[in-house]
Image (spheres, rainbow, N blue to C red):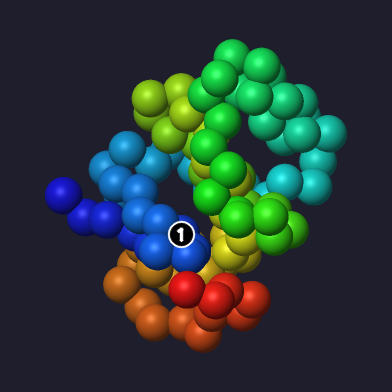
Amino acid sequence: MKLINIGFGNLVSATRLLSVISPDSAPVKRLVQEARDRGMLIDASFGRKTRSVLIMDTDHVILSALEPKTIRARLGGEEEEEEDEEG
């Protein structure tokens, strides 16, 4: 099982990850709100600005403070500088 660091020491399973998207559009904001209402939202941003939304195959929605391109690089095994992470 490959785990991906999504910021602040939080890890998600790469095999369970369906999508990494930007949180800026209205449909994504609705998706996040619906997940919050269902109790399926995990906020792994630690109070920072949400920069990516991870959609899991378990119907969970995870918020991360890392950019989607940073998570993509980590999925591919590449090393990329962490922008606003402290942990």
Residue drawn at 27 percent across, 56 percent down: 3
Q: Percent position (x, y) of residue 11?
A: 35, 54
Determine crowd level at label 1: few under 14, some 14-19, many 20+ residues with C-alpha closer than 10 A.
Answer: many
Q: Percent position (x, y) of residue 16?
A: 32, 38
From where the camera sits, is residue 51 visible?
Answer: no
**Camera-side residue: 48 or 62?**
48
Residue drawn at 72 percent across, 46 percent down: 23
Horizontal side of 42 relative to 79 (left or right) equals right
Please give the residue where the numbered disc 1 appears in the rendered image.
6
* Res. 15 image quadrant: top left
Residue drawn at 53 percent across, 37 percent down: 42
Residue drawn at 40 percent across, 56 percent down: 10
Q: Secondary structure at mark 1?
A: strand
* Res. 53 image quadrant: top right
The total of numbered circles placed on residues is: 1
Kindly identify the amino acid type of the residue bearing the numbered disc 1: Ile
**Camera-side residue: 26 or 85?**
85
Q: Percent position (x, y) of residue 12?
A: 35, 49
From where the camera sits, is residue 58 visible?
Answer: yes
Give the residue at the far top of this rendering.
Answer: 38
